[in-house]
Amino acid sequence: MFTHVMVGTSDLDRAKKFYDATLGALGHPEGVVDRHRIFWRTPGGNFAASLPINGEPATYANGGTVGFACASPEQGDAWHAAGLANGGTTCEDPPGIRENPRGKIYLAYLRDPDGNKLCVLHRPVD
């Protein structure tokens, strides 16, 4: 359904450091800088961070979340730790298994250095 998801940033270097670390923890290669934006390309789609092209300050979406798949709770914990070590802040409940109507899921949440809300999700096999 999606070709890419892009979030705004006010600092490309800071965003690259943060996302190279967090997406690297999920097994993705480093981002590629293209003028005013950075792309992390995968076979399943692309994620990007960009300086706003209109010259206005970058802002985050209140109520918006970008979710990434992770292969295991351990990988999700590594993603969360990499985010905290690279300028992110924790939000929501601590990383862990949650119950929902469809079963158990592992979730971990962060805000990137620009305030964008991020999540990793893993659906354990029961």
Image: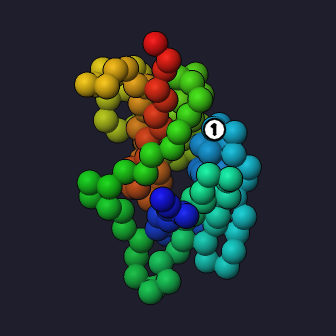
7 sits left or right of 19 in the view: left
Q: How is the image coloured?
A: rainbow
Q: Amino acid at mark 1?
A: Leu
Q: Tell which of 63 and 15 is nearer to you.
A: 63
34 sits left or right of 15 in the view: right
> Measured from the top left, where is residue 17 in percent x and y?
64, 53
Q: Is residue 93 above or below residue 109?
A: above
Q: Residues within 10 Å of mark 1 (few under 14, many from 20)?
A: some
Q: Tell which of 42 and 10 is nearer to you.
A: 42
Q: Tell which of 75 and 13 is nearer to you.
A: 75
Q: Mark 1 sits on what residue?
A: 26
Q: Is residue 14 visible?
A: no
Name the residue rendered at 57%, 24% in the picture. Answer: 72
Name the residue rendered at 27%, 58% in the picture. Answer: 62
Q: Is residue 97 above or below residue 17?
A: above
Q: Which residue ends up furthest to the top in the rendered image?
A: 126
Asked where in the image residue 115 lies, by quadrant, the reply is: bottom left
Name the residue rendered at 51%, 44% in the picture. Answer: 68
Asked where in the image residue 37 lies, by quadrant, the reply is: bottom right
Name the residue rendered at 46%, 67% in the picture. Answer: 8
Q: Is residue 105 visible?
A: yes
101 sits left or right of 94 in the view: left
- Label 1: element kind: loop
> Measured from the top left, where is residue 91 in percent x and y?
35, 38
Q: Is residue 49 above or below residue 123?
A: below
Mark count: 1
> Measured from the top left, where is residue 34 in percent x and y?
69, 74
